[in-house]
Image (spheres, helix red, strand yellow):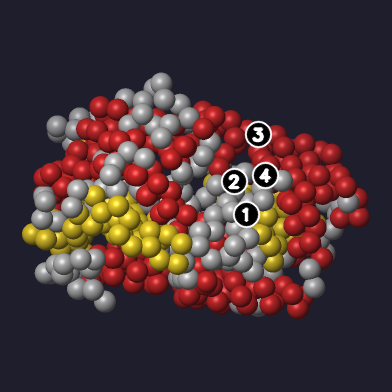
Amino acid sequence: MPSDLVIVYHRQPYEEVEVDGKIEFRENASPNGIVPTLKSFFGRVDHGAWVAWKAAEDPSNPEFERVVEISDSYGDYSVSRLPLTPAQVSSFYHVTSKEAFWPILHSFKEKYNYDPVDWPTFREVNWSFAEAAAAEAAENAVVWVHDYNLWLVPGYLRKLRPDVRISFFHHTPFPAADMFNVLPWRREIVESLLACDVVGFHIARFVANFVQVAQSMFDIEVVERQYVAESELDERSALAERRSPTRISYEGREIAVAATPVGVDVGYIRQLASEESTTEQARAIRKEVGEAQMVLSVGRTDYTKGGAQQLESFERVLENRPDLRGKVRLMHVSVSANRNMRVYFDIQNEIEQVAGRINGRFGTFEWQPIALISRAIPFDQLIAYYQAADVCWITPLADGMNLVCKEFVSSRLDGDGVLILSEFAGAAVQLGNAVIVNPYSHRSMDQALEKALVMPEDERRTRLAGLREAVERYDIRAWASAQMALFDHGAKRPGFRVA
C-alpha cells in the first residue's frame, strides 16, 4: 500500500525477539528516544512506511521478508528492510560514516581517516535506501531522511521521484566550511542535500554553517533570515547564533533550512520519576553513596564526549582540594559504543585507566572516588540515578544536542540539583541556567565542579526552575509540531494532515 509518509533511518523501528524458533516484532521497551518519537508520526497519516537495513549473508536471497506489515500502538505501517552484507555494513557505517564523517562533523580533524573509505559502496547503499523509499512513497508523499550516513539519499530520490517532498534532519553538529570541506566528496554530499525541500538541524549555528558550506561550492541565495528567539539563545554558549538563514534558493528552487531542537518526552520521564519503584531505587543509590555528594556523568564512550578529560578534571579537584576527599563520589556512566572499532576500544581503555589511577591514588577502604559503569542502564534505573545525584556533569567536547541533560532536568521532581553543561553541546544555547563550562579549559572545568558542590539551595532551585521551563517548552512534542509545520513548507500536499 503506498505511504503518505516514508521515514528513512538506518535502524529498524522495533525489537526482534525469537520465541519458540519464530521471530516476533516487539515495540521498543521504552517509549523514550528517537525511534518511538519518529513512529509517532505514523498516527497522522493514513499509511506510513519505514526504510531500514538488516544484515544478510546473501542480499540476493535474504532469509527474511523484504517488506513486513506492522500494526502496533503507533498505527499500521510497512517496514522495508534492505539486506546488507557484513562487508557493506562495515564499509558504509563503521568506516565511511564513523571514521571519515563523524570526526569531521565534530571538528576532530586529527581523527579523520580517508584512506579506507570505499565511496562506491557508500553510494550503492544510499541508492538502495532511495530506491526503497521511492517504491513505498505515494504520489506527493513526504519522505523524511535521517542523519549523515544517508547523505546521498535525497539526491537519488529526487531523480527517482521528483513529485515527493523530501525533508532531511541532521542529528549531529554541522561544521563550518573550513572543516567540512576537508571531505573530498563534499560537492556530491551538499548537492544531494540541496535536492531537499527542507533541511533541518538542532540549532541556528548548524544552519548557518550548512549555508556557508553550500555557498562555498554553489550559487546559493539566502532568501530569508530571521533573528533567533531570545528563549533559544544563551550568548554564553560558544554555539550561540543571533541571526540565521531560514530559506535559501538554488537553481530556481527554494529550500527551507530550519533549526528545530530535539527534546525529551517530559511527561513520560515524570511518570517514571513519580513511581514508587523509581523512588526506592533512588533511595538505595543514596544509601550506598552515604554522606558524600554524588556527581553523575552519563554518556557514550566516544572521544567527542570528553570522558577522559572529565575524569582528569575530577582528579585535579581531588588533588587541589584534600577537604573533598571522602565527601564526593563520581558515578561515571560511559556506555561502550562499539569495541570492535579501534577508536572506541582505545577511548574505553583510556577511561578505565584514568578511573583506576584516580581510585588508586585517592581511594580508601571506606571510600572509592569513582564508580565506573560501562554497560547500558535501563531507563527507569537511569531516572533513579538522576534523582539521587546532587550534580549532573555533562561536558562533551562537541555534541549536536545532548538529551541526557534534559532527562536530568525532567526527572528532578524535587526541584533541586545542579546541571553543569558544556558550551559545545547544542543544548547549551537553550539551557543558560546551567553552569556553563568550556571543557577545553582546566580552570573552567575544575571551578565549575567546585562551584556546583557548594551552591546554595536557593540558587540551585532558581536555576533548575529556569532549566525546567526551557526543557518543557522544547520537549519532544514541540519538536514534532515544528517538523509538521516544515513538512507543509511550500505547496500543500494531499494525504498528509498537519496537526
Q: Where is residue 199? Give x, y as percent.
A: 31, 55
- First in sequence, mark 3 or 2: give its number: 3
Tell me which residue sits at (19%, 33%) in the image.
Answer: 59
State left or right for residue 355 relative to residue 16. Answer: right
Please give the label number shown on residue 422.
1
Q: CA distance from mark 3 to mark 1?
A: 21 Å
**Left or right: residue 228 compared with residue 452:** left
Q: Secondary structure at mark 2?
A: loop
Which one is nearer the viewer's eye here, 312 or 215? 215
Alpha-carbon distance for marks 4 and 1?
9 Å
Amino acid type indicated by mark 2: Leu
User: On the rendered structure, is 162 left or right of 348?
Assistant: left
**Vertical order, 229 against 197 (above or below):** below
- Residue, disc 3: 350
389 and 102: which is toward the camera: 102
Residue type at mark 4: give it.
Tyr
Which comes sooner in the sequence, label 2 or label 4?
2
| Residue 230, placed above or below residue 14 | below
- Where is residue 30 drawn, in percent x and y? 42, 63
Residue 384: percent from left, percent from top: 61, 66
Of the image marks 4 and 1, the number of the one nearer the N terminus: 1
Give the quarter of the figure containing the N terminus: bottom left
From the viewer's perspective, is the residue at label 3 or at label 1 nearer?
1
**Closer to the eye: label 3 or 2:** 2
Residue on which disc 4 sits: 440
Contact, mark 1 vs mark 2 (Cβ under 8 Å)? yes
Q: Can residue 344 be seen in the rendering of this structure?
A: yes
Q: Earlier in the sequence, mark 3 or mark 1?
A: 3
Instruction: Kindly state the secondary structure of the residue where label 1 is placed.
Output: strand
